[in-house]
Image (spheres, grey):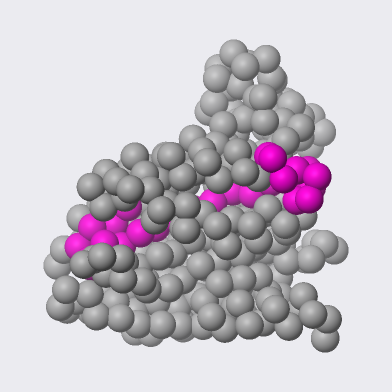
């Protein structure tokens, strides 16, 4: 086992990192509500190393209890998502107005982190990464942000609600063209920025950055008695499952770790060939 492989294994056991097939869980009590999470990652059929990373941890900041969850799905290498899992939440929490203006703090931190990645392009390479982050504050407020097509879905009384936005090039064609870029389905049949990247927003991608955005979509959701659980997953899951199918697949699975594993297994059974990473966070009164 190489030094990097040992480090990756330690990182995953701590609740963050990449793997060919890893699973884990955790729990906390936040303002009287039990919060349990589980995650599972599966390497796809591609020849390159695993490019998905995740974060799943609880942290106390001042008088607030936080749940920090994220999926980072890299492309053209794993160095950018690796950097994100190490730095993005730290940058968010460093913002002085994080607790009073969480949305603003997230936007600033996304911009700062992307700038740092671009500064380190020689070290981190030409690749990039999508991201979906979720911050649970005191068990009652959920703030989700994303760039790209990794997705966040919450179940409320068994009904799926998407909290993120899939940043598809075809949807953002006017903005891309205004910046001097173009959207093309060639090569292949998927719309791509400048014929290269299948998402319109991402971290990194220095060669395409003039035509890409790293501005996140941000949504705030109240966690109440109707809230069952939420799912964060890379597009390896969402390419083969709808939001409601994902919710229905695990609604009767008690443990979130088993739920995350079931979702990844179902995606593989549906012939998903991409890397798949999934986090399930359940609320127990």
Location of residue 49 with respect to 202 vertically, above or below = below
Specify whether 159 is left or right of 260: left
Which quadrant of the figure contains the N terminus?
bottom right
Residue 170: image x %, image y %?
59, 28
Q: Is residue 203 magenta?
A: no
Residue 41: percent from left, percent from top: 60, 73
**Residue 198 in view:** yes
Percent across and percent down for residue 52 are: 64, 63
Q: Nearer the viewer, residue 164 or 242?
A: 164
Q: Is residue 27 left or right of residue 48?
A: left
Q: Quadrant of the C terminus?
A: bottom left
Residue 228 position, x and y percent, is: 26, 69
Q: Quadrant of residue 136?
A: bottom left
Q: Please name whichever residue, 148 or 124, is drawn nearer the observer in this view of the structure.
A: 124
Residue under the point 65% across and 45% down: 117
Q: Is residue 130 left or right of residue 226?
A: right
Residue at x-position 24% and y-position 80%: 29
Q: Residue at x 69, y 19 (%)?
A: 181
Q: Is residue 248 visible?
A: no
Which portion, as a residue range, is magenta?
Answer: 118-143
């Amino acid at each position: 086992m190489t030094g990097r492989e040992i480090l990756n294994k330690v990182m995953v056991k701590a609740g963050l990192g990449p793997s060919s097939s890893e699973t884990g869980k955790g729990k906390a009590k936040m303002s009287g509500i039990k919060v349990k999470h589980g995650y599972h990652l599966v390497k796809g059929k591609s020849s390159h190393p695993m490019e998905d990373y995740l974060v799943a941890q609880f942290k106390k900041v001042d008088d607030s209890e936080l749940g920090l969850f994220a999926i980072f799905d890299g492309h053209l290498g794993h160095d950018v998502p690796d950097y994100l899992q190490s730095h993005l939440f730290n940058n968010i929490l460093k913002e002085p107005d994080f607790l009073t203006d969480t949305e603003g703090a997230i936007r600033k931190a996304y911009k700062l982190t992307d700038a740092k990645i671009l500064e380190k392009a020689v070290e981190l390479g030409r690749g990039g990464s999508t991201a979906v982050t979720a911050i649970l504050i005191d068990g009652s407020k959920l703030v989700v942000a994303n760039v790209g097509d990794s997705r966040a879905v919450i179940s409320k009384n068994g009904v799926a609600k998407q909290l993120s936005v899939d940043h598809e090039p075809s949807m953002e064609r006017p903005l891309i063209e205004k910046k001097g870029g173009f959207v093309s389905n060639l090569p292949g049949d998927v719309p791509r920025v400048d014929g290269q990247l299948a998402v319109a927003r991402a971290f990194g991608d220095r060669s395409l950055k003039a035509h890409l955005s790293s501005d996140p979509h941000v949504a705030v959701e109240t966690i109440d008695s109707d809230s069952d659980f939420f799912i964060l997953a890379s597009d390896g899951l969402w390419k083969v499952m709808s939001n409601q199918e994902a919710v229905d697949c695990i609604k009767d699975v008690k443990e979130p770790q088993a739920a995350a594993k079931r979702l990844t297994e179902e995606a593989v059974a549906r012939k998903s060939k991409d890397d798949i990473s999934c986090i399930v966070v359940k609320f127990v009164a």
